[in-house]
Amino acid sequence: MRVRIEKGSDKLLTELAKASGASLLSRPASAQGEHVILCPRGKLMDALEVLRARGIKGAVTVHEADYAFVAQNAMMEKLQAALR
């Protein structure tokens, strides 16, 4: 999901993780940007409840993520190390 969080994002992201299993994929590049957060589909409403309870009134958009490619992949690094 994408959401703009003005301030206090670290505390809010920790609360989201506990309530819904959500995890941060990326932070905004500027103050006007949005956080990109991965959240299990079955926990989306739990995440939305946390956001609204913490004063996030703006739009929250949800997109299905088939894949997430990141620069570092801890699981792949462990596998590659074991195969050496």
Image (cartoon, rainbow, N blue to C red):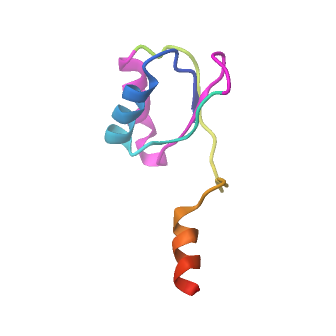
* Residue 38 magenta: yes
- Residue 40 picture location, percent across and down: 47, 48
The tally of labels here is: 0
Give the percent coordinates (x, y) of residue 67: 65, 56
Q: Is 26 positioned to the left or the right of 47 in the image?
A: right
* Residue found at x 58% / y 86%: 84
Q: What percent of the width, then of the height, locates residue 74? A: 53, 63
Horizontal placement of 79 versus 12: left or right?
A: right
In this rendering, is residue 18 above or below 69? above
61 relative to 57, above or below = below
Q: Nearer the viewer, residue 82 or 18?
A: 82
Q: Nearer the viewer, residue 72 or 12?
A: 72
Taking the magenta stretch, the answer to whether it contains residue 7 is no
Name which residue lies at 52% across and 68% down.
Answer: 75
Q: Is residue 19 left or right of residue 51?
A: left
Tell me the quarter of the picture where residue 22 sits. Answer: top left
- Name the one closer to the observer, 10 or 48: 10
Residue drawn 62% across and 47% down?
Answer: 64
Residue 22 visible to an observer of this rendering: yes
Quadrant holding the N terminus? top right
Q: Residue at x 42, y 28 (%)?
A: 10
**Start and end of the magenta stretch?**
29-54
Q: Determine whether 28 is above or below 79 in the image.
A: above
Where is residue 77, by image quadrant? Answer: bottom right
**Residue, far bottom:** 84
Q: Can residue 49 be seen by looking at this rendering?
A: no
